[in-house]
Image: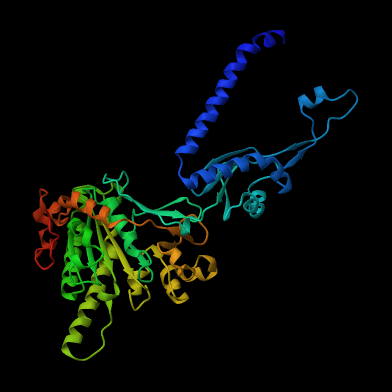
């Protein structure tokens, strides 16, 4: 003990310097943080300082009646050491939207106890909502949201670099500000529904902007809202598209036929070229790119025309053929690298045939006006989750918020999707325009192509290719 006291003058300055450095580092982080993060940092300090008291009031403590070694040594002779009240240890971090608290469980204080106390924690921490999830054996993670991410407008700035994982579609953040992504591997189709101006196009813009820098992804768009590419929502991205058609049913039919012919060619050639029967076993590549067909305002191409005059009959035959061709791509194109994204205000059976819609495993819905439209987009189970229904998203604050069922999560998840500025979309399209190549040309350039020539597309003039610089 005397030796320790003798070295105290040397140790004390070091301890003070370490504490001062830690405080200075925290001050620098606070000053450099944005306004929202600063508020969360102050909230995190309150959480740490008040945790011992709050845990006792919320019933998150346990009494240990067995004295420890220190209690036995310090207790007066002939007396029993008092029981010890144990409190879960926590680690608190702050971000723009609130705090993340990681806690160690104790006997009789586990996941269920933390979940029951979530509403008390939300009130004490002044949070909009609190979630409690398992964080590994004997641990839980508590997410406290101070600022609701669903009503916080966000922007996405594309980097212009090829993504590391082409099967990963980053959608945005959920109601607890946790990142949400969807795997596109082995997904034949995606449906996107929602009222006009709810955020559907911005969702697709982000997907194109993120994947556009890759040589292993190609895009074709059929936009039923316009007649030409420069008129619609894809005007800034048209140079990155290898094909585009508007509301002309003849041109759309020609595009669908062209892609079905490519699908047949790929089905015949996949084993010879890739050595596998499913492209996703090796992933997209420049030789075998992922071909994404985006059909916006899909009801334009599948409308059931009624009438006996020759023109109406011709249009009815075209839309029926369009449904047949798109069904072929959705049902048979997955393993050879096709992804079909169908967008419509309502994805009811009269807008998108059910034999196409029900095969698409991924479905998202932005704001809807009726429960029937929500059921068509998300399935009948959405009736059991009224708080997550897209019918509740009609407030202007929820523009850009979508609902979907996530694998591994019960119920439905609400997602804030970011807005992609038009200038950023145009920048990405301009720098990647040289990659807008017809994917059929890759197969034609490979040795031994003649053996697949019977199914290869031969007419590429009916669908206007995107202009390149």
Residue farthest along the bottom direction in this orientation: 308
Q: Compared to 339, does 280 lie above or below?
A: above
Q: Is residue 85 left or right of residue 88?
A: right
Q: Compared to 385, does 94 lie above or below?
A: above
> How many circles with numbers are drawn on the protein?
0
**Residue shown at 43%/62% (left/top)?**
401
Along the line of sight, which residue is nearer the eye, 75 or 351? 75
Along the line of sight, which residue is nearer the eye, 247 or 29? 29
**Residue shown at 46%/67% (left/top)?**
393
Q: Position of residue 201 (x, y in %)?
A: 31, 63
Along the line of sight, which residue is nearer the eye, 188 or 177? 177
Q: Is residue 358 left or right of residue 53?
A: left
Along the line of sight, which residue is nearer the eye, 10 or 197? 10
Can residue 108 be seen from the camera position used here? no
Which quadrant: the N terminus? top right
Q: Position of residue 444 (x, y in %)?
A: 11, 53
Q: Position of residue 356 (x, y in %)?
A: 32, 70
Q: How is the image coloured?
A: rainbow
Can residue 62 be seen from the camera position used here? yes
Q: Is residue 177 left or right of residue 281?
A: right
Name the quadrant containing residue 340: bottom left
Q: Compared to 236, does 160 lie above or below?
A: above
Q: Compared to 250, does 406 lie above or below?
A: above
Q: Position of residue 196 (x, y in %)?
A: 35, 71
Name the quadrant containing residue 258: bottom left
């Amino acid at each position: 003990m005397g030796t320790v006291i003798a070295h105290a003058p040397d140790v004390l300055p070091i301890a003070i310097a370490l504490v001062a450095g830690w405080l200075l580092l925290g001050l620098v982080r606070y000053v450099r943080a944005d306004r929202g993060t600063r508020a969360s940092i102050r909230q995190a300090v309150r959480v740490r300082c008040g945790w011992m008291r709050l845990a006792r009031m919320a019933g998150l403590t346990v009494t240990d009646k067995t004295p420890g070694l220190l209690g036995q040594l310090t207790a007066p002779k002939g007396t029993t050491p008092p029981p010890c009240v144990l409190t879960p240890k926590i680690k608190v971090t702050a971000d723009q939207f609130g705090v993340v608290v990681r806690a160690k469980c104790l006997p009789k204080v586990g996941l269920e106890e933390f979940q029951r106390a979530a509403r008390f924690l939300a009130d004490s921490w002044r949070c909009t909502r609190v979630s409690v999830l398992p964080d590994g054996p004997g641990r839980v993670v508590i997410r406290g949201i101070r600022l609701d991410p669903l009503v916080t407008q966000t922007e996405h700035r594309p980097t212009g670099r090829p993504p590391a994982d082409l099967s990963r579609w980053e959608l945005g953040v959920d109601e607890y500000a946790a990142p949400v992504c969807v795997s596109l591997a082995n997904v034949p189709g995606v449906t996107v529904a929602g009222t006009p101006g709810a955020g559907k196009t911005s969702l697709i813009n982000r997907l194109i902007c993120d994947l556009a820098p890759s040589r292993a992804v190609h895009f074709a768009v059929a936009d039923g809202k316009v007649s030409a590419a420069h008129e619609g929502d894809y005007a800034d991205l048209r140079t990155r598209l290898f094909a585009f058609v508007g509301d002309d049913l003849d041109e759309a039919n020609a595009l669908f036929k062209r892609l079905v012919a490519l699908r047949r060619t790929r089905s015949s050639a996949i084993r010879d070229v890739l050595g596998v029967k499913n492209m996703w076993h090796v992933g997209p590549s420049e030789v075998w790119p992922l071909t994404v067909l985006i059909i916006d305002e899909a009801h334009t191409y599948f409308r059931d025309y009624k009438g006996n005059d020759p023109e109406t009959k011709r249009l009815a035959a075209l839309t029926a053929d369009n449904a047949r061709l798109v069904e072929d791509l959705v049902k048979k194109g997955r393993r050879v690298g096709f992804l079909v994204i169908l967008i419509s205000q309502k994805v009811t059976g009269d807008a998108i045939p059910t034999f196409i819609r029900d095969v698409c495993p991924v479905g998202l819905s932005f704001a809807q006006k009726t429960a029937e439209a929500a059921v068509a987009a998300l399935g009948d189970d959405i009736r059991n989750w009224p708080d997550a229904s897209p019918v509740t998203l009609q407030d202007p604050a929820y523009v850009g918020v979508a609902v979907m069922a996530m694998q591994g999560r019960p119920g439905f998840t609400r997602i804030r999707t970011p807005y992609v500025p038009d200038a950023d979309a145009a920048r990405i399209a301009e720098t990647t325009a040289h990659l807008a190549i017809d994917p059929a040309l890759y197969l034609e350039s490979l040795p031994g192509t003649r053996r697949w020539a019977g199914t290869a597309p031969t007419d590429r003039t009916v669908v206007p290719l995107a202009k390149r610089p």
